[in-house]
Image: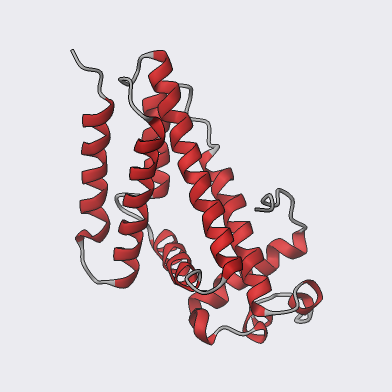
Amino acid sequence: MSPARTEWSDAEEEIMRATYRALLSHGYADLSMSHIADELDKSKAAPYYYYDSKDELLVAFLDYAIYRFEDGLDTDVGDDPKERLDHAVEKLLPLRPDEKTRDLQAVLVELRAQAVTNDAFREQFSRLDAEIVETIREIVQRGVDDGTFRDVDATRIAEHVLATIIGGRYGQATTDREDAIGAPRVSLTSYLDAELRPRP
């Protein structure tokens, strides 16, 4: 698996933002390079200069999403493992997501569905999921090591968190259920408390 990119030019970032807007407007199935070009404030030829096809551009978009994900979780919330875990869970599965967050998750769910048959998309989502698991695992393990959490298998906890996040996002993006996010989030909080709270 190739490493994720960590640097993006201003022009590329503009294309990524245009891609996001075009995905919101047209969805994956109806998206075209010309739709993305239409969303650009500057040169309409820019997407064609950097990318040969829609899927190549969308693979880059997923790379960019991973980059932004990592940047978002790096927000300084101190060294306390419980605070860091609470922060990560809120970022990944917000209890009351705003419209921008809901839109982004809907885009990612639609693209994730393509990973069933698209190997390049599958690689990107494999990387994103691995990044989430490793982020949660590191936080939990640090809490185990300093006594904040009881001795648990940090990887098992992290995989459970990931599965809940994916399920909650999928439910929110594909149904009108009011509890699609709220119920999994409350359940996840209860699970983490029960698994991690030190025994008396």
Residue 10 in picture, x, y percent from top left: 76, 59
Q: Of 103 and 141, which appears nearest the observer?
A: 141
Residue 166 in picture, x, y percent from top left: 37, 56
What residue is drawn where x is 26% and y is 43%? 188
9 shown above or below 53: above
195 shown above or below 183: above
Furthest toward the right, the residue is 49
Residue 78 in picture, x, y percent from top left: 48, 24
Q: Of 31 and 141, which appears nearest the observer?
A: 141
Q: Of 123 and 6, which appears nearest the observer?
A: 123
Q: Is residue 17 left or right of residue 142?
A: right
164 shown above or below 15: above
Q: Quadrant of residue 83?
A: top left
Counting every numbered tag in the picture gives 0
Furthest toward the left, the residue is 200
Can see residue 43?
A: no
What residue is drawn where x is 39% and y is 63%? 102
What residue is drawn where x is 21% and y is 67%? 177
Q: Is residue 114 left or right of residue 176?
A: right
What residue is drawn where x is 35% and y is 68%? 173
Q: Quadrant of residue 81?
A: top left
How does the figure colour the protein chain or chains?
A: secondary structure
Residue 95 in picture, x, y percent from top left: 29, 49
Can see residue 186?
A: yes
Which image quarter holds the C terminus?
top left
